[in-house]
Amino acid sequence: MGSIAADSTVVLLQSIATTATILLVLAAFIKVVYFLWWNPLRVQRMMVGQGVLGPQYQLIFGNTRQASQMNIAALHKPLKLSDDVFQKVQPHIYTWTKAYGKNYISWQGPEPTLNISDTEMAKQVMNNKDDHFVKGKPTSFIKMMIGYGLVMADGENWVKQRNLANHAFHGESLKAMLPAMVDSVYLMLERWKGIKGNDVEVFEEFRILSSEVISRTAFGSSYEEGRNIFHMISQLATLTVRNFHTWRIPGLSLLWRMADEAEGYRLEKAIRAAILDVVQKREAQKNSGKMNGYGTDFLGLLLEANHEDDGSKKITINTLVDECKTFYFAGQETTNTLLGWTMFHLASHPYWQEEARKEVVDVFGDLDPNFVGVAKLRTVIEQKSIPNTVYGITFGV
């Protein structure tokens, strides 16, 4: 009798285990179906009901494949000498705004993104006084490249990091940086004297120039010291752009990494190590008495905040590294691109090239640029509105 009872218990436990396994598998299946199919279709129907259209959601990948195909096709078309480049650099957004209007919904995998180019609506989003709009979770590549620096930070962390940036780059600080900027330009011009022939690859030259300026003004070092960091961040940026329209199953990289992901994580670790080396050198200068404090540049302010006793002002070493990555990348790429684009326009419009040159000579003569004179440049610094700007808001419903 005892044996029969024991066998019955074993059978019962096996039955319960089998049932539990089936229920877990069923629950997981339902969750996957909801995440990949039911919820995207529900959100799309809801947005259509509010008059917001967009490209049809495609299972698993959303619209990433469509966007990727459009970008590849655009890259194979010749670029005309014109500033009308929207359909070249953002062909998917150009196509979808033409088809669905200024505000439309698209899909990064199963995650919806509301893209808006209506000016008034964009102002509401950018003001965000009531915190109705939160920053989306960065992709794995963006996280590797800039982490949770100022661009991706939110809430209390954003306030801390914004205050540090404001302190480091306010008007008086920028005045003090101008001599270093001028010296960097002189170095570039000296380098140009040694270039053979009449052609200068200005985009590459401006990359070196902007890197030199950022290294000197924000981190107290030369371009030579930061060269490796800039080079690795540039490589990581290339990987990020290449995988921008690729959606991966969350958590899959923990089990298996594609070649680009493996290379990205390798570069991330190397960049972190290089930045920490710069940090340790600055700390050593302070500890040896060669510097009074950590310095007044951006790196110095970050280190002061890292050693702060007040928890409301203190930042972690991870935040410090992320802020350095953000300014190494964002400062260099945006400035380099703007300078290159400006040179393109000046070359395309000889009249305005001559007007700009005349104004600079009239204001400065043979003197180096100074902060007071820069404020008098009207032709050179005249601001124009930027057309075709699209803001993307990722949201979960």
Image: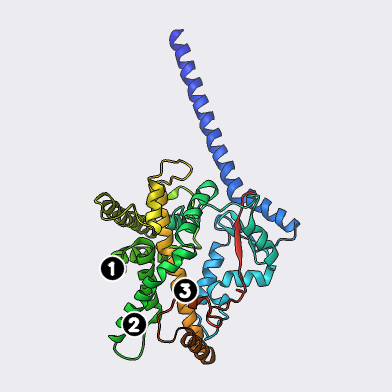
Q: What residue lies at 54% left-to-right and 29% top-to-bottom?
A: 19
For residue 242, say whether it is visible: no
Residue 240 percent across, percent down from the top left: 44, 62
For the residues labelled 2 and 3, the Cα–Cα distance comes to 21 Å
Which quarter of the figure has residue 263? bottom left
Count of marks placed on residues: 3
Report the front residue among 255 and 317.
317
Residue 114 versus residue 335 in the image, above or below: above
**Mark 2 or 3, nearer chain start:** 2
In which quadrant of the rendered view does residue 146 lie? bottom left
Residue 371 tag number:
3
- Residue that mark 2 sits on: 189
Q: Quadrant of residue 203?
A: bottom left
Q: Secondary structure at mark 3?
A: helix
Evaluate if marks 1 and 2 touch, with contact meaning CB atoms under 8 Å apart.
no
Q: From what the image shows, is residue 366 above or below residue 321?
A: below
Q: CA distance from mark 1 to mark 2?
A: 17 Å
Could you tell me the amino acid type at mark 1?
Glu
User: Label 3 neighbourhood size at 10 Å, few (<14), some (14-19), many (20+)?
Assistant: some
> Front-most of 379 and 228?
379
> Mark 2 or mark 3, which is nearer to you?
3
Helix, strand or loop for disc 1: helix
Give the amino acid type for the residue marked by disc 3 in the picture: Phe
Q: Earlier in the sequence, mark 1 or mark 3?
A: 1
User: Which of the two discs, 1 and 2, labels the residue nearer the N terminus?
Assistant: 2
The residue singled out by tag 1 in the image is 224
Q: Position of residue 362 (x, y in %)?
A: 49, 87
Q: Residue at x 39, y 66 (%)?
A: 214
On screen, 216 above or below 204?
above
Picture coordinates of residue 107, whole percent (x, y): 59, 59
As shown in the figure, which amino acid type bears the numbered disc 2?
Leu
Between the residue at mark 1 and the residue at mark 3, the CA separation in whole angstroms equals 27 Å
